[in-house]
Image (cartoon, grey):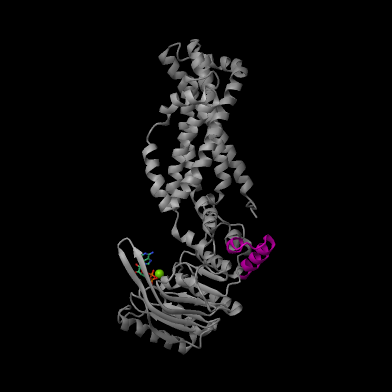
Amino acid sequence: MAEVSFEHVSMTYKGLGGDVLALSDLDLTLAEGEPISIIGPSGGGKSTTLLLAAGLLKPTKGEVKVSGETVTGPRNTTSLILQDFGLLPWKTVEQNAALGLKIRKFTKKQQDERTAQALDQVGLTEFASSYPNELSGGMRQRLALARAVALDSDLLLMDEPLSALDALLREKLQDTLLSLWKDIGYSQILVTHSIEEAVFLGKRIVLMSPRPGRVAAIVENPEMGDADYRFNPSFHECCEKLRSLLVGQGTLAEGRVDE
Amino acid sequence: MNKMHPNARTVTVRASRSKFFGYLGAIILCLIGWYVTSVLVDSPALPTPFETWPVLVENIPALLPEFWVSLYRVVIAMTIGTVIGVPLGLMIGRAPRADAVFAPVLFLLYPIPKIVLLPVLLVLLGLADAPKIVLIALTIFFQITMTARDAARAVPEASILSVRSLGGNRLDVYRHVIVPASMPELFTALRIGSGTAIAILFFAESIAGSSGLGWFIVDAWGMINYPRMFAGIIAMAVLGVIIYELLEFLERRLTRWRRAGIS
Ligand SMILES: Nc1ncnc2c1ncn2[C@@H]1O[C@H](COP(=O)(O)OP(=O)(O)O)[C@@H](O)[C@H]1O
Ligand SMILES: [Mg+2]
């Protein structure tokens, strides 16, 4: 599995309205097979961090390494899931799940086998020839996961993957994410704006500062990893801790009970 | 991989049946309108459908070769214009540097009605198929290139990012995202373009050469044989419908996903 490290990473966007310093001296290391959550103010460079890890952006300063190698472009076994899941509406469920394999030139036989297995793993087998428009939000999310599963990823990067779903469905898919991670054991970076989600799915929760993004705090959460962790007192303790950090940062207004 | 949905076939049958009745209704409506107008106008230049019908039947052997020639010219010309225009438009739509070079040229030439080139083309290419095909191809080329360029620019960045994050190169991005995403707009442009194409065909055929429906119509006019002229006009309408349906058929095959999730 893959170890990830951000070493003194700065990222400046050259935009039409002038330069934007999105990340400034970000330092963060992720152990092999470790799932972490990233939470923080909007515009604080969370998405930028994921795009750097995915090899879709190059840092202005510093280095991003995966498995000890400097990232210079998309890597074969890294999967990125964006907020809108990155599904292509003109491809069937099966073709969407197989896209990574196809691009990476797996044989047709391997494509079919792995895709079938991945769809089975996320429970979408009977929808193989449907189109994304015919799926519910939760099913689309699972399809995006199937794509990552089919690729046998060792690093899964997710940018607010559940934010478009309603609360009940979100918990169900958090369970799915957790069990897939436990089954496969990839390293995982989850960007989320939900405190509960960050705590449920992150062995460590990284709090980012307002722009320019840096690591403001890291909350250890060693007890995560069980589906019923939500009922555990330490779960709530951890949520509270994170909440007060966010309030202290000014990201969350004081006195608000939930996000 | 492309298994049809269980009820897709019955849906197709139902759709083609309703299309048949649609055309039938339209034909009846047109015939009534035509008849009423010709009775009111009462001029030999506008014969009734009843006067035209026997002439049409009688002229089918004479019409058929001209019909095929015209159909051939339009289809070949539209194909050439599309095959050159689509890749160019999609390419410059996604490549700012190429766009900086090509876009001003396109903007400059696009509004010029290509028909003004007919004299030049006739001198250079003779009176046969070539000048007509080139003229129509040019018109379609500009329309389709402009559309392809705009469609490629409008493709959502997230779709592109998802293919790139899977390790896709530029070619993969075109193949899996840009081309399929632009398909609906391209077909709209082609359908609109087909009307222009037929108008240009008529004009070019009526001016130069002695073949095609355009020539047939103007020739009948010259003989002051109005029913014969109308037989040619009807053949022209059929030509339009065939091209339209051809595009419709291709579009249905290539953009099946657009009908997914609407029921
Ligand atoms: N392509 C871009 N061009 C210019 N500025 C950008 C671009 N992408 C992001 N930014 C800026 O960088 C900062 C960090 O963005 P982002 O990483 O998306 O933050 P987050 O995901 O935490 O909300 C923001 O101020 C944003 O406006
Ligand atoms: Mg973001």
The residue closer to the viewer here, B43 or A23, is A23
Q: Position of residue B151 (x, y in %)?
A: 44, 49
Answer with the quarter of the image where residue A240 lies. bottom left
Q: Position of residue A195 (x, y in %)?
A: 41, 79
Q: Is residue A138 in sight in this rendering? A: yes
Q: Is residue A259 in sight in this rendering? A: no
Q: Quadrant of ligand 2?
A: bottom left
Task: Please give the name of the residue rendered at 47% of the width and 38% of the height, measured from the top-left corner.
Answer: B141
Q: Is residue A52 left or right of residue B129?
A: left
The residue closer to the viewer here, B15 or B143, is B143
Query: Which is the main secondary structure of the residues drawn in magenta?
Result: helix
User: Can you say whether B228 is above or below A109 in the image?
Assistant: above
The residue closer to the viewer here, B203 or A97, is B203
User: Can you say whether A55 is above or below B69 in the image?
Assistant: below
User: Can you say whether B258 is above or below B131 in the image?
Assistant: below
Q: Position of residue A180 (x, y in %)?
A: 58, 75
Task: Please give the name of the residue rendered at 44% of the width and 16% of the height, measured from the top-left corner.
Answer: B38
Q: Is residue A108 left or right of residue A168?
A: right
Magenta span: A99-121
Seen from this angle, which residue lies furthest front?
B124
